[in-house]
Amino acid sequence: MKKLFPVFVILLVVTSCSSVKTYNEQITSLHTVEDLQNDVDKLYKQLKKHHPKLYQYTPKKVLDFKFDSLKTSIKKPMTSREFYKVLAPVVTNVRQGHVSVGSANKRFTRKERKILKKKKFEFYDLDFEYLENKLWVKSTRGKDSVLAGCEVVKIENDLTANLVDKFKTQFASDGYNTSLHNRFVGKNFKSFYYRNKGFVDSLKVTFKNEDSIFVKTFKRLKKEEKKDKPTSDSTKVVKPKKLTKEERKAKKLKAKKRRKYNNKHGYMPSIKQYTRSLKFIGKDSTVAYMKIRGFGNGSFKEFYKESFTKLDSAKSKYFILDLRDNGGGRISEIDNLYSYLTDKSYQFITESEVNSRMPFFKYLMSNTSPVGLKIVSGILSPFIATHNLLKTKKKDGKLYYKFNKHSKIKAPNPSHFKGAIYVLINGNSFSASSILSTHLKANKRATFVGEETGGAYNGTVAGIYKVYQLPSSKLKIRMGLMQIEAPQKQSPDGYGIKPDIKLTPTIEDRKLNVDTELEWILNDIEKKD
């Protein structure tokens, strides 16, 4: 057995390298017209089979026409990336933000990935924002802070305006609102550029700052290694100080405390920020300000419990919840947070419409699911099937899945906040953050400031996802399998939560480091006091 193990490892590595090579050849080669048209049919068939609200915003007749027109327009062979550029805009006609097509990008062997990990692409240190119909550098994570506030005019030979217009056609909001597009294209500009252009080692970018125009080339460079502190005698070997038992214990406790804090606040090492934070601001530092960047990481229950205990102790009369650029996340987290913001009994979500009595199998057994996951799912299939059958039921000719925990009537948390609430929203407030906002808006529990949310008031198709890979182009389509919605509804359908006070920041605000929306709230609070 010991002798066979090295042979097995060698075979695994060879097979892996071979599959990477085969995949890369497939996505860069020209696919026949027939194969591409077949991929279009496969994609649309998957949507019709699994998406429970496919025709919510676009009638079947119109969507059929869009996909048929795409097939007719394919008259010559294309690579996978070229196909992505014509397919993605058609899929956006579904008008469901959780339905998306991913581009087929080059894969790397284990050896190549190891080399790449030691390098850093300077371009990825830039964070962008799209304001006043222009792309700006919002902030920088590297040393080049002078670029913050500069307009991006051109990348290589492409005008930024043309790139943005193209990228905006490749994703959708929920319904008909357009507030998400400017926000999303700015926040995710780097990802869209990679999807459309592929892997590059350098980029020549033209910037504009006031009246001056300059060009900077960003490269993929070797990461800086941490340097040891210099000693007076470079030949002298400095032995690390030996810690006492008490010092080792104290160090271990400190590290454990830091890990717990990071988990509670949802630390994101890539951007060195916390997902959840609470501080007291305003004239007398009595206004509670909570920033939530997403509902997807870390242990949230302790954070909210601790935070609202602090609000109670501080006798805060005002609470500001910042959901700007919050793309969503877990239902369990927004349900928990809402229990601290309401003073009435509530049902958080209704039963979710689905297209199958076995929605979890559709997610687990997709053609993109790892083999290991499929094997485990097969072993556990009797339990999964029983669970799904007990949770789904048919009503009025439709299937519904019941989230018992979130669809039952619940009382507010005993420590719920009793003062006035303000909520900051923008076009990037999507999915779970929109569902939370629907409750607060419908129950007139908060004053909303900012822009219309990118997520719809009447819910979204999410919950669990199926990711399906097309046979020829290898493009992947992701779709939600469950309609997640609050009990409250608005008419007309297809729009987000609209602000009570509509405010959009300007580039001048950004340059002066002025938070227009937050300043308005603080001024309003000062008038009331």
Image (cartoon, helix red, strand yellow):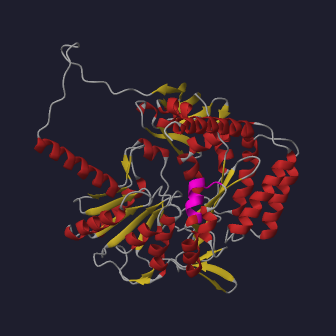
Q: Is residue 111 left or right of residue 413?
A: right
Number of numbered discs visible in the structure rendering: 0
Residue stretch in magenta? 368-378
Which of the two residues, 65 or 481, is positioned nearer the viewer here?
A: 481
In depth, the one of 139 and 505 nearer the eye is 139
Q: Is residue 315 left or right of residue 294?
A: left
In which image quadrant can residue 207 be found?
Answer: top right
Residue 206 vs 264, above or below: the answer is above
Residue 513 position within the rendered picture, expressed as x and y whole percent measured from the top left: 39, 45
Q: Is residue 260 magenta?
A: no
In the depicted view, which residue is nearer to us: 283 or 52? 52
Residue 108 visible within the image: no
* Residue beneath the point at 81% across and 49% down: 36
Which quarter of the figure is the C terminus placed in? bottom left
Q: Position of residue 526 (x, y in %)?
A: 29, 64
**Is 165 on the left or on the right of 7, as rendered?**
right
